[in-house]
Image (spheres, grey):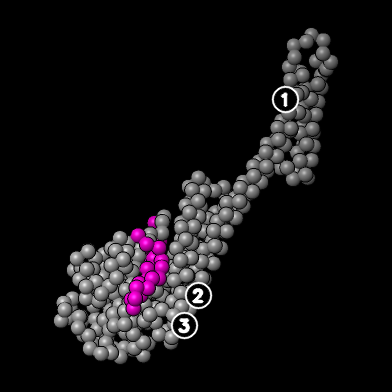
Amino acid sequence: MTVVSAYVYRKGLRVREARLTEAGLELRPGEFVWIGLVDPDEAELRLLANKFKLHPLAVEDALSAHQLPKVEVYGHELFVVARTAEFSGDQIHYGETHIFMGKSYVVSVRHGSARAHTALRAHLEASPALLNHGPDYVVHGILDFIVDGYQPIVEEIEEEVLATETRALDAFLLRADVRRIFTLRGELLRFRRILGPMEEVASKLEHLSLPGLDAEVRPYFRDVADHVRRVANRVEGLRDVLSSVFEVSNLLEQQRQGIITRKLAAWAAILAVPTAIAGIYGMNFQFMPELHWQFGYPTTLAAILVLCCGLYAAFRRSGWL
């Protein structure tokens, strides 16, 4: 079985482990069960569907695992889909968590998520007064846990963007740097497409009157929505920074190329003086002035030196050298 954990709670305290049998899943008044599954097969999920009367459409969604974040109501059952995210290597890898919630049960189904709910379960069990609210507070805890996983992604990308920005100011960006900028922009764009529906999910859970959600628990989802909103704002900021890094890099590259071009032009003008003079006196004419003059050679060298130094000083003053 792919059951990670299954426990029964009463008054916010864990009272026993729930075995996936008819007898093991029997609940007394005031109890609820939280069952966690990872990549279950159809038979495993059908067993829980028969026990808790889960809606077939929701079960199909949980099996297919290709859903955007959403909230759906099936009678007295609430079905929530959330997307997990993890930054690894050059990409943001996504998973899904499907949550079935009823009056006395929570079934969480994880697909492609590397973050286990062990720490989350321990955190919730450490606050019996809050866990005593029931399955709706567990749903809040799962969503809050998923959204908290978005923060390290943004922070890691921010550090990489700052490093790229520093390199762009110091030297030309390499082809690999430019490719990385566009890769990160694409990843942030796809991430933003997830954050929008996630914010909508939290907003619906906060504002709408949905089955199984206690009025006292609903405000907790406002905190989840705020976290998603802050991450979305940071993602938008990062996309703008990446665009500006690329534009600034192009401007700096054009500036550096202009400086190099001016330097080359200045040196070419300085070298043109001896080249022109040597070219004139290199012509094989019989009758040319100063050919038989005793001081012609040193005078010519002195003239070349004076003209070159004068041009060098003029270019230095103008900032070309």
Q: Secondary structure at mark 2?
A: helix
Q: Amino acid at mark 3?
A: Pro
Q: Residues within 10 Å of mark 3 (few under 14, many from 20)?
A: some
Disc on the earlier residue, 3 or 2 = 3
User: Residue placed at 24% from the left, 83% from the top?
Assistant: 8
Q: Residue furthest top?
A: 286
Q: Real-space Cα distance between discs 1 and 3?
A: 83 Å
Name the image quarter holding the N terminus: bottom left
Return the mark for residue 230.
none
Residue 52 part of the magenta segment: no
User: Residue placed at 47% from the left, 61% from the top?
Assistant: 193
Of labels 2 and 1, the one closer to you: 2
Disc on the earlier residue, 1 or 3 = 3
Residue range of the region highlighted in magenta in the rendering: 66-89
Q: Nearer the viewer, residue 124 or 34?
A: 34
Locate residue 243 relative to residue 13 in the image: left or right: right
Classify 259 as above or below 12.
above
Name the image quarter holding the C terminus: top right
Is residue 204 something that shows in the picture? yes
Q: Nearer the viewer, residue 313 or 93?
A: 93
Residue holding disc 3: 219
Q: Real-space Cα distance between discs 2 and 1?
A: 72 Å
Residue holding disc 1: 275
User: Residue placed at 41% from the left, 78% from the top?
Assistant: 210
